[in-house]
Amino acid sequence: MQRAGDAIPASEWSLPGQFPRFILPTLDEVRAGPGERLELYLHIPHRIPASFRINLMTSAQLMHDMQWGWLLLGITFGAMLLAALVSAAFMVLHRDRIFVWYGLYAVAALFACLTHSGIAFHLLWPHGGLWPSTALLFFMLMAAACQLQFAKLLFISDSKARIPVRASEALGVLNVAVALIFPWISMNHWVAVLFLAQGLVVLSMLGTATLVIIAWRRGNHLARALMLTFVPLFATVCLGLLEGQSLVNLPQVSYNAPIYAAALEVILLGLVLQWFARERHGEVERERALASTDPLTGFLTAAHFHQALRQAWSDAQRDNTDVSIAYVELPIASFSKRLSDDTVKRTVRILRTVTDEADTVGRLDGQTLAILMPGVSINEKLSVRLSRIVALGLMPEDNRPGSEKLKFRIVATSRRAFMANVRQLDTDLRHLLMSTSIWRNKSIRILGGRQDSRLADFVESQVLADIWEEALQDELQPSENSTQPALPPLREPAV
């Protein structure tokens, strides 16, 4: 007597292999029997209606079939495992929940396919009992729950889809609950829970299809691609369940067809989600940039500028380098919003001309801009750069001959000159800007010295006037297409 099956440990099978196999007698043994006949009986006990495929093969045919089967299954399982690993990498890279659910789905689908193929029974749980018959639906329930969740993520920004989202969440929780309870069910209730699990799998796939169709009708591009990858798997799994219940008979369809369909769906879905993640990652980056950027100037907002300041200050302390910071006060005295915006826009053009690529510019409030200059100390280079800001504000623009002069006030310091805590820096710089008695005819001041934050002149007006002629040489020359004469050199202090 030869024995094999799910309820029997793999070590007790007559012939080890992916499926139960039995050796038939040879023709000589048949001829040696009474009447040249030999009767064989095949007994297959089962608890639910089921259909079984029985194939008669020679040894050569069996060997050829096994070789092709192992080759295709190896490629299939390798591709599914690679998809799960790639999803884990994208999850770490993009920190996107949709890749968490996709990775869990790929792993659950992989174990479901391993169970369906019979490989898991021999390699992972070769002990027999109810679990080999329960494992397939266990992993199918888990895969269906994960599939519902990443289909739900299609509606993250859609407040009108609250009911489908809540329904998918409830159905996913029910799938997980039944899957966790199923392996511990006694024999008396096992068949009832089996039918419940099969119904939940079909219901979950219908729910996923419904979510995808709703998203498709609302113009979601990912839903269209997802539907193309989902329909073949849905049809194959449903046909497999119906054939397992002896409701349909499809001998022309391979037993491993659901495995190949699941692998194809997992791989195509991974490609679709990578495309979707790139698009959504771009949207997130754009939203993050808009949240950190002042809409009028294009510079950093106050919160993000102070964050960059703390980071640059910390890096300079660690590397023993210097970093300078300057606060520029805009001369906004008009109550007209249009004139105020024009002043800000002109100041933006001036700062973009003066600053380097390594500099960071932020708008602290409606009347104050800040410039962070890594690697710059209080020296002639900084003097020239700040002097250019003052000079460009006093010079009329070429395309606006009647534009008013902008009389900036600038306070500056550096890490080596300002020895106090960086948190005190903003307070001291603003206090110096608001002090009216110290400016007189000077436009630039330095906040320097020690912990007492004493004030010191940065550039005397005569020195500033002497620097302008050299620093603004390009600005003082007429353009090639301009008929206006060159502006005379600045000989007298203008600040």
Image (cartoon, rainbow, N blue to C red):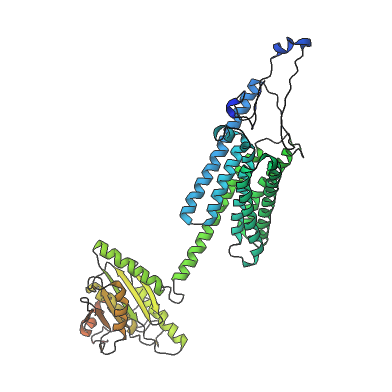
| Identity of the residue drawn at 64% across and 20% down | 59
Q: Position of residue 466 (x, y in %)?
A: 22, 81
Q: Is residue 377 left or right of residue 328?
A: left
Q: Position of residue 226 (x, y in %)?
A: 62, 53
Q: Position of residue 287 (x, y in %)?
A: 49, 67
Residue 355 lies in quadrant: bottom left
| Identity of the residue drawn at 22% across and 81% down | 454
Q: Quadrant of the N terminus?
A: top right
- The number of discs equals 0
Residue 391 lies in quadrant: bottom left
Q: Is residue 84 left or right of residue 195?
A: left
- Of residues 337 and 27, which is closer to you in this image? 27
- The residue positioned farthest toward the right in the image shown: 35
Q: Position of residue 159 (x, y in %)?
A: 62, 67
Name above or below for residue 470 compared with residue 335. above
| Identity of the residue drawn at 47% across and 85% down | 338
Q: Is residue 430 left or right of residue 84?
A: left
- Of residues 339 and 418, which is closer to you in this image? 418
Q: Quadrant of the C terminus?
A: bottom left
Name above or below for residue 340 compared with residue 158. below
Residue 359 lies in quadrant: bottom left
- Of residues 386 and 61, which is closer to you in this image? 61
Whether residue 486 can be seen here: no
Whether residue 227 can be seen here: yes
Name above or below for residue 244 compared with residue 197. above
Q: Is residue 300 left or right of residue 420?
A: right
